[in-house]
Image (spheres, rainbow, N blue to C red):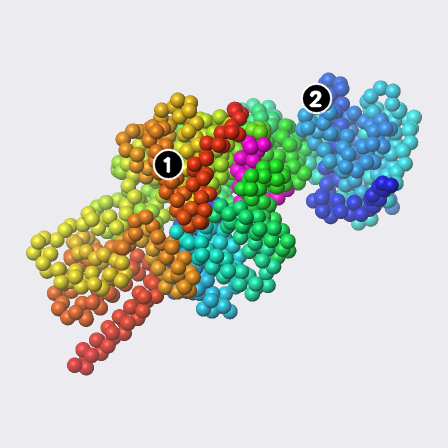
Amino acid sequence: MDHKFQINLGGIIDLLSNHLYSGPEVFVRELMQNATDAITARQRLEQGHVGDIRMEIHHAKGKAPTVMMSDNGIGLTPEEVHTFLATIGLSSKRALDGESQTDYIGQFGIGILSCFVVSDAITVYSKSAKANTSAVEWKAKPDGTYTLKEIDRDLEPGTQVWLTAKPGCEEHFEPGRVKELAKHFGGLLPFPIRISHGKVNQVINEHGAPWREKYKNDRERYKSYLDFGREIFEADFLDAIPLKSKAGDVEGLAYVLPYAVTLTSKRAHRVYLKNMLLSENVENLLPDWAFFVKAAVNANDLRPTASRESFYEDAKLQTARETLGDCLRTYLMDLAEKDTRKLDRIISLHSMAIKSLATTDDEFYRLVMDWLVFETSQGEMTFGDYRKQHDVVRYVPTVDQFRQVSRVSQAHGQVVINGGYTYDAELLAKAEALLDMTTEVVDPTALSQSFDELELHEQDTVAEFLRAAETVLKPFRCEPDVKKYKPKELPALYTTNTEGRFFRSLEQSKEIANPLWSGVLDNLGKKDKPQAIFAHICFNFENPLVHRLCTVKDRAILHRSIQMLYLQSLLLGHHPLSVKEMTLLNEGLLSLIEWGIGMKES
Amino acid sequence: MLELSEQIKELLEEAEGLEHGPVQLALVERAVEIADVHNELDVSFHARVTLVEAAIFGDRPDIALIAFSWLLSKFDAEPDRFDSFELLWSYKWILGHVALFPTIPKDRIDDLFDDMKLRYKAEGSTLHAYWTLRRDNAQSMGDKAGAKKAHAKMLSTPRDHLSNCLACVQDGNVDLHVFLNDDAAAIQAAKPILNGKMSCSVVPECTYAGAVLPFLRLGNAKRAMECFASGYRLIGRQSTFLPQKAKYIVGLTLTDNLSRAVKLLDRHLPEALDSVDPSAKFEFYLAARLLLEKLAENGKKTVPIRVPKKLELGGESKPTVAVLTGWLDTELQGLASAFDARNGNKSFAKRVRDFRTMFEYAKPYPMT
């Protein structure tokens, strides 16, 4: 025989209040949501029906405070009460044929239970708008029992819900709190929410959504937008951008954040569904790149997931997201034409976001590239300024290489850009395809090729020195050369490229690896074209010390000096020393000290 | 000048705020170099732990292997100085990627797995993660029997603190069933992920792509293209996820969305050329080859893509179908023979030879 699960309602309520709902205050949301859905359903029956939601707060001396919420929606018949109010997990709002799933907000059939979190008794009076039904009174207790009777009071169609505060929950029934919550959740509803307490009557959603209001002029509109942003987000934004998408029926505002955010920070947009607050933390509504804005929007035709933190990833959402992205893009393009000062401010604040977007969006790239600031060997300048003076985009891919190269190129009258900062190399590389400029990655190893060669007689002078350098540097797979370049204070320039750096780090790991891993690294280093040399050192013949070294005959001194110049050039270029090089440095320093002492003693 | 540790911390923090890829990797590499230059062992260690992760997810497994080897040596020299958990955790990433390099011989890969096993046992692991990795490795090496055996072992081993996350294991199940040609089981395994019930940093990104082919082979072109629509959005912008992009090109080709397939080829071919991962290259080139076959069949003479500088085809601004096909065939054969020689089977050559059989599942489903 089949048995049914026994359900302990108290346990379920405890579960709901502690886990599913974010806090006890959600009872206001759930009641408003039911009321709104009921009004929507009635409007389907009676065209032009005007919705109305009322809340009454009663604080009688010596009695627990009560709250009543009523709506003039479709109401419930006695049968519907049994089926929907008293069956957990079955919502009256499941889509019927011909209705789309998004016609109603509530879909999970547990809304009314949230009232038990703050109230030990729920009383509902309801009268269905359907013909020939009588009004009902439903009283439910948290032990899972309820009574239902038909009453012959002459009620208008609609529903009233009465709650009485549980001991300890009185704060949620305070008039100020109830108003605040009603406004928080239902502030954008297109019909009035009237709250009365004693003699005070108030409509809490007079203004509704600022994007639905009519304004005298653009200034007034703009001010209202920013005021709304300040009110809901408590921040002074740089700007408000109107958003609208037919897909998903989305409308609202995107506020430009007055502070920088990182790419991976959580996007938290405030989203209303059918004008009821859905969540303050929706993530997937705008394109990923739109992290410089915080949005407040209403969506009438998108499906939320049960967590309320995102929408279902369907085609409709994708189209909506693209359309909303276009709104932001158009805004930036407009700024570029009309208000470059504001654009500059946004760019400097959100440069990371903007650079990231520009690397993947060609149209946007063309728009903003000229405003972006880069470090060059002549100081910081915008790309637009650089472009006015140069046809070739010459850049160095890493910061350390830039430091090596910029000094030399500067002395040779060539401007190079530092592509080592985040996104800069990617952006500069795109200038070729998108701005029709020649781009040139300055390969530090190639740089020395442009230096002046020695005269024939000078070549004779350095022959001995060069041979010695070859011998000394061979174990380090570094190829020496002597040329003439500026600045003459620089005795040697060590250069390597990406591949060279890769092999340096490979060797560095291999020096300390066990046999198994040493083998793996060997396998990994196997390339199509094995490289014997992965770095160059170019000694500067203009440098007095190098000049003198070329005449030194003592092999020991010559070798040691070359080694030390090699190590110095490595350190200048911020290259980590390998174990072998570190040993060399120690030995070198010691022998220099010994020579020093020896010279003194002799 | 900032304090050294501050400077490194800042670099690593900036890197943390970026998505995986070359930009993030460059920042972490710089942090490692600075730490090394100043000979700060603990800082170097910490920075390299970050480097392994950035390199693995930034599609530079070669850099990850080099950094990991360094970490392992330093750890073995002073086991009490460093935390073993992070190291053992990243060992999984490493072994998940060794098979991608055909220059690493089979025996050595086995030795690495033995080494991992010893270290995991010493840490009190159930070896659940070991068997997961063994299974994935067997797949990468075209070894069906090995994959089945390791999968069974994994299922009978309890999870522990070193296990891959549930979403990753589940995503691996999808790939395994596709590999074993059991499409219904693959889709069954993909369901909880596609329904949004499981996720992590690389799931559902991988799963959407993984489900395209099984959906197609089951005749469900609509679902296959839905996976493309949802999944490609998540990865299209990034320079990583090359094998997944290859799967989308296959899916678009087989559903006759050719202009979109060509767009993906145009957009991601430079990434394939730049990739250091021969296995990812293979997948991408094979997908491109399928697309070109279809273009040729439709009588197309040229491929409307920009030719990356690196691809030296000579002359024409738009490559002809014939020239690009020839280039791909050479690359594919080279890669396949390298992999097959290492793996000791013919699975890669077979895929190159038989790629046309995929047209059996072709079913036009135009995307709007």
Quick one: label 2, few (<14), some, or many (20+) residues within 10 Å? Answer: few
Q: Residue at x 83, y 25 (%)?
A: A128
Q: Residue at x 75, y 44 (%)?
A: A16
Residue B347, image x and y in percent? 46, 43
Is disc 1 placed on a helix, strand or loop?
helix
Indicate whether A475 appears above or below A354: below
From the image, state whether disc 1 or disc 2 is nearer to you: 1
Residue B39, image x and y in percent? 38, 65
Is disc 2 placed on a helix, strand or loop?
loop
Q: Nearer the viewer, residue A576 or B272?
A: B272
Indicate whether B124 appears above or below A483: below
Amino acid beneath label 2: Gly
Residue B270, image x and y in percent? 38, 38
Q: How far is the residue under mark 1 from the one under mark 2? A: 54 Å
Amino acid beneath label 1: Asp
Horizontal relation, residue A179 to residue A386: left or right: right
Which residue range is magenta in the image?
B196-218
Q: Nearer the viewer, residue A441 or A240?
A: A441
Indicate whether A265 appears above or below B84: above
Q: Residue at x 59, y 60 (%)?
A: B125
Residue at the farthest front position:
B345
Q: Is residue B199 within the magenta segment?
A: yes
Q: Which residue is mark 2?
A: A98
Q: Which residue is mark 1?
A: B329
State whether residue A461 appears in this view: yes
Please identify the quarter of the rendering in which residue B67 is found: bottom left
Residue at the farthest top position:
A47
Residue A490, image x and y in percent? 22, 58
